[in-house]
Image (cartoon, rainbow, N blue to C red):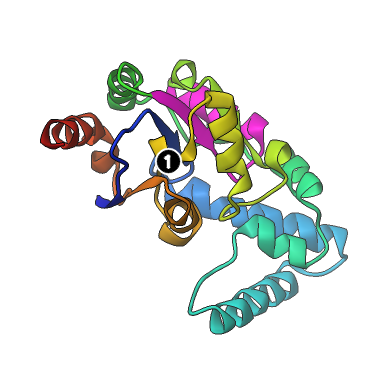
Amino acid sequence: MKIIALPGIIRGLIFDIDQTLYDNREYYDGQKILLVKKLAQVRSRSFEEMLREIDAHQKEYAEKNSGKKLSLGNLFLRLGISLEENSEWRTELFKPENYLSKDEKLIMTMKALSAMYYIAAVSNTSTHVAIRTLVVLGVEEFFPVVIGLDRSLASKPALKPFEMASVELQIPLRHLVSIGDRMEVDLELPVMHGMGGILIESMEDIYSLPGVLIRNKSEE
């Protein structure tokens, strides 16, 4: 865990979902494969050709942007696939139920956090898939606000989904903390706009959040 920044007063937490609230590389990495296969089918191309083109776009972007990478949503947008269509593909293709299961430690963690803070989820997948993922993990009751790609029509690192969560939680950005596994996607822009940021590097980081935030509060 790396604490990038924390507001003086924390009222709410905004969580990324994929590879933040669970750790399953097979499912996570498979999402890209499924989307590339779908794009290849739509474009009447082979999977290998489509993957090479996508990787070339990603490499070109990274070279022009200090090594940063595009989210899959923004990458596909550059290839002519709208965020609406991208979200529909995700709802059709992604099956969190086949890879994830109830996480009792995560349930206890979110129960403790929800007693201290308001909580939301902001994800680059569709809202439908995001909610299904939370259901499978057993933590959907702790997330009254879920902002998916189809709702925001802006793929992180865009600020818009965070602003939407801020409005729905009725908490200013300056009193919110973004929590995610990717610095440039989940944290950089929120922190630039006054939010806190915590980089998650393992599930143990998630499980330890209540204690970390309590210690931080006691040290203020």
Residue 22 placement (x, y as % from top left): 40, 39
User: Quick one: SS at disc 1?
Assistant: helix
Q: Please tell me which residue is depicted at 42% across the width and 53% down the height of the picture.
A: 191
Q: Quadrant of the C terminus?
A: top left
Neighbourhood count class around disc 1 (C-alpha, 10 Å): few under 14, some 14–19, many 20 upward: many
Q: Nearer the viewer, residue 134 or 114?
A: 114
Q: Please tell me which residue is depicted at 60% across the width and 42% down the height of the picture.
A: 161
Is the residue 163 above or below the residue 154 in the image?
above
Is the residue 148 above or below the residue 48 in the image?
above
Q: Nearer the viewer, residue 88 or 35?
A: 88
Please give left or right for residue 39 compared with residue 11 in the image: right
Task: Check residue 195 for magenta coloring.
Answer: no
Q: Is residue 210 visible?
A: yes
Q: What stretch is highlighted in magenta?
A: 118-138
Q: Can residue 98 be seen in this view?
A: no
Please give left or right for residue 150 compared with residue 170 in the image: right
Which amino acid type corresponds to the residue marked 1 in the rendered image?
A: Arg
Residue 48 placement (x, y as % from top left): 70, 72
Picture mark count: 1
Is the residue 177 above or below the residue 34 in the image?
above
Task: Check residue 120 for magenta coloring.
Answer: yes
* Disc 1 target residue: 174
Give residue 107's quadrant in the image. top left
Residue 130 placement (x, y as % from top left): 58, 33
Give residue 164's quadrant in the image. top right
Residue 36 placement (x, y as % from top left): 70, 60
Q: Please tell me which residue is depicted at 83% across the width and 69% down the height of the picture.
A: 45
